[in-house]
Image (spheres, coloured by chain):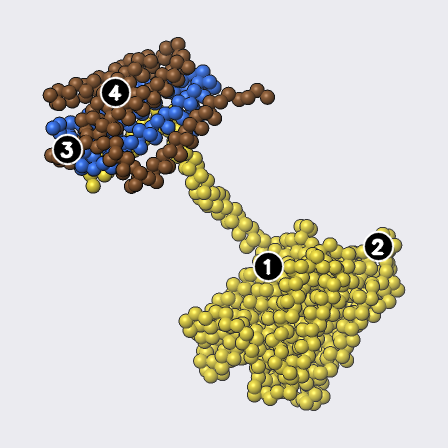
Chain colours: A brown, B blue, C yellow
Amino acid sequence: MSHFLFFLLAALCFGSVLGMIIYKNQAYNALFLILAFASLGGLFGFLDAPFIAVVQIIIYAGAIMVLFIFVIMMIDVRFGIPPEKKKWTLYLSLGLAIILFFELALALKGAFSLNGPDAVHKASPADLGRVLFTKYLYQFEITSILIIAAIVGAIVLVKKKEKE
Amino acid sequence: MIPISYFLVLSILLFIMGAIAFFIKRDLITMFMAVEVMLNAANLAFLALAKSANSIDGQVIVFFIITVAAAEATVGLAIILLIFRQKKTIKSEDIKLMKG
Amino acid sequence: MTEIFWLIPFVPALSTLILGVFGRKLPKKYVSFQACFAIFISFAISVISLIGLLQTARESYPIVKNLFSWINSGSFQANLSLQLDPLSAVMALVVSGVGFIIHVYSVGYMANDEGYTRYFTYLNLFTFAMLILVMASNIVLMFVGWEGVGLCSYLLIGFWFEKHSAANAGKKAFIVNRVGDAAFIIGILFILVHIGSGEFTAINGAISGGAVSQGLATVIAILLFVGATGKSAQIPLYVWLPDAMEGPTPVSALIHAATMVTAGVYMVCRMNLLYTLSETAALIVATVGALTAIYAGTMALTQNDIKRVLAYSTISQIGYMFIGCGVGAYAAGMFHLYTHAFFKSLLFLCAGSVMHALSGEANMKKMGGLRKYLPITYPTFLIGAIAIAGVPFLSGFFSKDAILTQAFAQGKYFIWALGILGAVLTALYMFRLIFLTFYGEERLEPEAKKHIHESPRAMTIPLVILAFFSVVAGYIGLPVVFGKKLNLFHRFLEPVIGEGHEAHLGLGTEWMLILISVAVAFLGIYIAYVFYIRSPQIPRTLVARFPFVHKLLFNKYYVDEIYNALFVNSTIKGSEIIYDKFDLKVIDGGVNGAATAAGFFGKILSYFQSGLIKDYALIFLLGLIIFLGYLLIF
């Protein structure tokens, strides 16, 4: 049963990303991506990380992609994009990507035989919180500052110049 | 249970597809989305290996990655907006200020 | 009293440093004061050292003071060490004494010149180098001084460097000197290799101990002498001295009359054991000296530039000094050096005074009848001329006579004959100069005549002082006929040059030789009188009858042209070719090529910088793959 669910979610994810690649319309791309993130969230659940799964859906699919959609609507690209002039970079990048695939596979080869421990312990938010606020407290605080900086930065960047 | 290798394979596939998408696409927004895909692929790999090592640290890392990706998306989209305002285009070929 | 003798060179050195660094900001009056005062202190210390030296026992000569360990490599040592002995004391006195007088003269002569401070700096520098040269206790340090005076000679000859001829003259002096110095260096190397040390005490010890064979001595002596011909302007390296008259007249007086050009003579006297050992070398020295004396004397007869006559006269007189050294009469040679310093610098300074009076005119054809306008310059000039001509009771007579007597006594009759002929020429050209300048009809330019004036006191007082010494300086070296005891000079130098190198003649022969010298001097004066006062048409007829001879003499035997054709032009051509083929193509090509290559590679690399994000990302990917591959393989 779980295998079936896994393959369903995996196929969904894979298919959405594929769709994102194929279609040229940005809005379609964004929607496909939302689907991909959602399925990923499901996959996270399989990995004994319920909190992360929910966070993924709320933040990634819910906030970030919405941001993307806002920007797509604001930019309002009507005209189509003519084909690329330099085709050879395209083929080169495809080839390189395939090479990378094999390399990564090779790199992670050692981990393929690993298996999870038999005792399954789903990580609850409490567990996560416990670690976050003790062992990773410093990084936690820094990250919060980072977020504030990003917010302020984004606002400052986009603010229209005040007419004197 | 589902073996870890499945997740790792999926992660690799997602990463490669994200990379391919980055090189194929020619408008900035979609390229940016491809970057997000790559990040998620990394998240998946982290979680898989965290589960196999029975450590919660992997999840903490993923937590941070999601947060930082959010911040990065914010600022990145702001910049794309600015570029569009200036050049009225989001084609990546037209952004050639650093030529030479 | 002798402890402070090592300060003698360093007081002018300190002065040079101060003037060189701060000179521009100091007032002119102070500059000249400091420069002259520094030399005066040197002179005072020289006097004190001399007195101290006379009080010390002869066995402790020379007094050496090692100041600084300079070169210390393996078994070879050369230190900055100075020595005080009779020879160096005499030279130090001459250099600082005459130098001081000329410094004072320069205050007046160079008063309106722009390079006033530079002049005194160079002059002090020269004095320092010359004093190092004469007081060095080893030959390597002496060579340092040797080179130093060469440098200062270049700087001072080309003092008015904006004038083309002056700059060329300076260059010529330096290069010709260099040719001599090359031989000198090889000589030094021979000494260092075979004797092991450059210290004069060591060299003398080795020679008297028999460690030096005659062949070796000959080789070294000749090499050193070639260097001396460059520095002291003998055949074949004399060509720079007449051109050196482009420099200011006090420079000509100091460097090219009294001090630098005598460095070669000093060197031969310092190495006298070497030249005594090798008779061949001594003979060469004497012969070259004698030939040069005649040769230069003939050229002096036809020159019209007042300073050129004196330049050739200097070359000729130094030839006499070398005659003295060559026949073994080192004391006589040094004695002539000492008296010559006085009357030659007097003559040069007087010539400068004449030129100053005539607003820079140096051509004797445009002078004449000046004796009523220059009441101080004329008598002093006359005294100098009489002294150099060898008229009895003045200094030149004593010194010249000493040399010629010794030449005769050693059996070198041919050299003696040349010397006597030279004496005639000396008197002749000298009095030609006097008569053309001060007597006869006035041939002055009207502009010059309007501004004619006697020189200021700063210039005339040195003239008087030098004239005084030109008269009395000879009395410390009375000839043997008056009793050997009375030749104080010779006795003073004995520890250095030894006794008994000189042969002794019977009293009768000595008196005869003296009479011949005197007669010859008066003969020359008389001929000059006839040619230029009584019947001035005689020179003109002679020139008309023997145009070829006159042309030859007037054009200095075309030696400059010969040297140019043989050596100079080929060297210039050669260096042009090297410049073209090697310097431009290879060296510049290499440097420029490196730059071009860098530019080329930069151009290639810039192709990658398209400004497009995707291309950069591509490179990222490539880098990632390579890196990952590297990690995987290893």
Specify the quadrant that holds the C terminus of chain C: top left
The residue lying at 72 percent from left, 62 percent from top is C31
Residue marked by disc 4: A38
- Residue A120's mark? 3
Find residue A30 and report its horizontal and vertical position in percent: 31, 16
Q: Is residue A120 above or below residue C252?
A: above
Q: What is the C-alpha distance between the residues marked 1 and 3?
A: 99 Å
Q: What secondary structure is marked by label 2?
A: helix
The residue lying at 86 percent from left, 58 percent from top is C452
Residue marked by disc 1: C174
Amino acid type assigned to the residue bearing label 3 in the image: Val
Task: Tell me the chain of label 2.
Answer: C
Q: Is residue C305 above or below residue B81?
A: below
Q: What secondary structure is marked by label 1?
A: helix
Which is closer to the viewer, label 3 or label 2? Answer: 3
Which is closer to the viewer, label 1 or label 3? Answer: 3
Task: Tell me the chain of label 3.
Answer: A
Q: Using the rendered image, report if marks 3 and 2 lie on a common chain.
A: no
Find residue A24 and report its horizontal and vertical position in percent: 31, 13
Q: Is residue C182 above or below residue C281?
A: above
Residue C16 visible in this rendered orientation of the protein? yes
The residue lying at 47 percent from left, 43 percent from top is C588
Amino acid type assigned to the residue bearing label 2 in the image: Ala
Task: Tell me the chain of label 4.
Answer: A
